[in-house]
Amino acid sequence: MTPQEIAEASARAMWNEDSASQRLGMSLDHVAPGEATLSMTVTEAMSNGHGTCHGGYIFTLADSAFAFACNAYNQLVVAQHCSITYLLPCRMGDRLTATAQEVSRRGRSGIYDIRITNQNGEHVAEFRGHSRSVKGTHLPVEG
């Protein structure tokens, strides 16, 4: 399999078990080795007491994009540390897109930056995730 085929197959295997992302209405728009793009629409159920999107939902979208990007190599990978900076409020009906890009991957550790934008292309949040590989694979290993 090519690296792209491995990324796509790993993403399918993960998506089939990812009820959190699915139930929040996320879509997996792109996956490649070290990259992923997910999107979702902010619903009324996601709004907070200020009438804006609760930051936890924005974090969850970014975290899901992070997960698909760092798990694109048929190696089980988990989050070790994550942080987010909110730049603009999001409102009900906004379509948010989280684009994850690998910054570094060495040994068992990785660093990924995830940019979250709205439907107007405005940069609404920035997320950085540190990953750690663990035992196991998404796909059967031939050999």
Image (tube, helix red, strand yellow):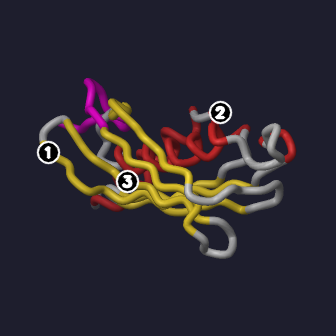
Observer-nearest residue: 66 or 141? Answer: 66
Is the N terminus in the top left, top right, bottom left or bottom right quadrant? bottom left
Q: Nearer the viewer, mark 1 or mark 3?
A: 1
Is the C terminus in the top left, top right, bottom left or bottom right quadrant? top left
Q: Residue at x 50, y 62 (%)?
A: 30
Disc 3 residue type? Ala
Q: Residue at x 32, y 56 (%)?
A: 34
Q: Nearer the viewer, mark 2 or mark 1?
A: 1
Which residue does the numbered mark 2 point to in the structure image? 19
Mark 2 surroundings: few (<14), some (14-19) or many (≥20) residues within 10 A: few
Which of the labelled discs sits on residue 52, or is there none? none
Q: How many marks?
A: 3
Secondary element under disc 2, as helix, strand or loop, is helix
In primary-sequence order, the first of circles 2 and 1 is: 2
State the separation of the CA atoms marked 1 and 3: 18 Å
In primary-sequence order, the first of circles 1 and 3 is: 3
**Residue 14: percent from left, percent from top:** 49, 39
**Residue 42: percent from left, percent from top:** 76, 52
Disc 1 residue type? Arg
Which residue does the numbered mark 3 point to in the structure image? 7
State the separation of the CA atoms marked 3 and 2: 19 Å
Most distant residue in the front direction? 50
Q: What residue span does the magenta drawing correspond to?
A: 131-143
Most distant residue in the top direction? 135
Which residue does the numbered mark 1 point to in the structure image? 106
**For residue 4, side relative to residue 54 (left or right):** left
Residue 17 lies in quadrant: top right
In primary-sequence order, the first of circles 3 and 2 is: 3
Visible residue check, residue 21: no
